[in-house]
Image: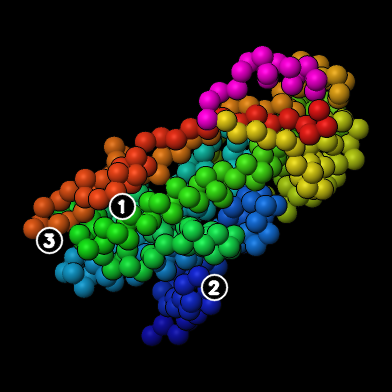
Amino acid sequence: MNTKYKIINDPVHGFISISSPEILRLIDHPFFQRLRYISQMGLSYLVYPGAHHTRLQHAIGAMYLMNRAVDVLRTKNIQISDEEKEAVMSAILLHDIGHGPFSHALEYAIIQNIRHETLSMVIMEQLNRELNGRLDLALSIFKDEYPKKFLHELISSQLDTDRLDYLQRDSFFTGVIEGRINAERIIEMLNVSDNLLTVDEKGIYSVEKFIVSRRFMYWQVYFHKTSFMFEKILEQTLRRAKILFQSGTHIFLDNDLKFFFEKNHFQPDEETLMQFAKITDADILIHLKKWTTHSDKILSFLAKTIIERKPMKIEISPVPFDEAVIKEIKEKSKRYFSINDSEVSYLVLHGEMSHIAYDRAQNPIRIQMKTGELKEFSETTDYSYIRALSHKVSKFYLIYAKNL
């Protein structure tokens, strides 16, 4: 008889009951507990003060929704064994375990050749070895190697439990009510046909709201120009610090971060994994604070931008910025900061941001009509703007110092 039982009071989903010893063992593992100290939304709290929630909260919330989804499918006579249920819940619990500080800071600035998805896989495989193969089925589902394809789609698709949780959670903690969705309604409408995840016809309107909310959250929250600017500045700060260290300049650096500053290419091996698992948001913040007083004016300026919340100027345009305009701003920046051509790239940033709210070409959402026919979601909606959301939207940014 299992006597270990946990109830988590989640502000988004309410009470979450966990009784599986294996799930509890995963939650208690140091690799997973590290996610308490990894922000779910990076530096977005510099714009939305309430957005201090973590990857751990999101992972547990996604696991809760997975549990609900499996139970709903079982009521519709979809065969899912207890072993499969625990495996798919383990997989969604661990799906973000490879995220680094501020979600993407190290991934984009320090270890560019290893994505967080790869690190998640390596960590899951390490955990599986520790647990003597108890995650074999979870890994098979996670890698989309298991015959029941709909189980993988519950983890990773355009209507998965990952998205259903983070949209609810992020809109809750930012206070952006336009991003709210009815995840419970969507889950109740889930079904399976031809081994693939589907949505019952009466759930069309809930899916429409989900797609619109996702679009709104990306452009209003995740790509909010000020939080986007801070994320880019964080990448540049880490990049500048690494260049200074590798050129022999003394900077404050502890041994954990030093491991990633000493080389440029990494293998997803156990050593990299163990070092990576030591670093959290707190480590990065401590370094940023120390770097604000560094003698290198670029590093100190960038660090102060974040620590003292002194935003740089960011312009957003539907078309690429004129090269002459960029060149003029770079020249002004070089004169203002007394820096050279190679250094100005840290302080004048430009590029493209893009997003597709619903990609019907990639694992489309399937609607199961009352007649039994399966239709791709965009073919079932009455609103043309929903179909338009299946196209990529691109915007262009230009970041530079306000003083100019």
Is 167 placed left or right of 383 in the picture? Answer: right
Q: CA distance from mark 3 to mark 2?
A: 36 Å
Nearer the observer: mark 3 or 1; the answer is: 3
Residue at the location (18% across, 69% down)? 76
Nearer the observer: mark 1 or 2; the answer is: 2
Please state which amino acid type lies under the numbered disc 2.
Pro
Nearer the observer: mark 3 or 2; the answer is: 3
Which of marks 1 and 3 precedes in the sequence? 1
Is residue 171 in the magenta section? no
> Is residue 264 at all visible to an observer of this figure?
no
Q: CA distance from mark 1 to mark 2?
A: 26 Å
Is 43 placed left or right of 364 in the picture? Answer: right
> Is residue 74 at all visible to an observer of this figure?
yes
Which of marks 2 and 1 precedes in the sequence? 2
The N terminus appears in which quarter of the rendering?
bottom left
Residue at the location (37% across, 57% down)? 209
Q: Which numbered marker is on residue 402?
A: none
Q: Are marks 3 and 2 in contact (CB under 8 Å)?
A: no
State the image quarter where residue 326 is shown: top right
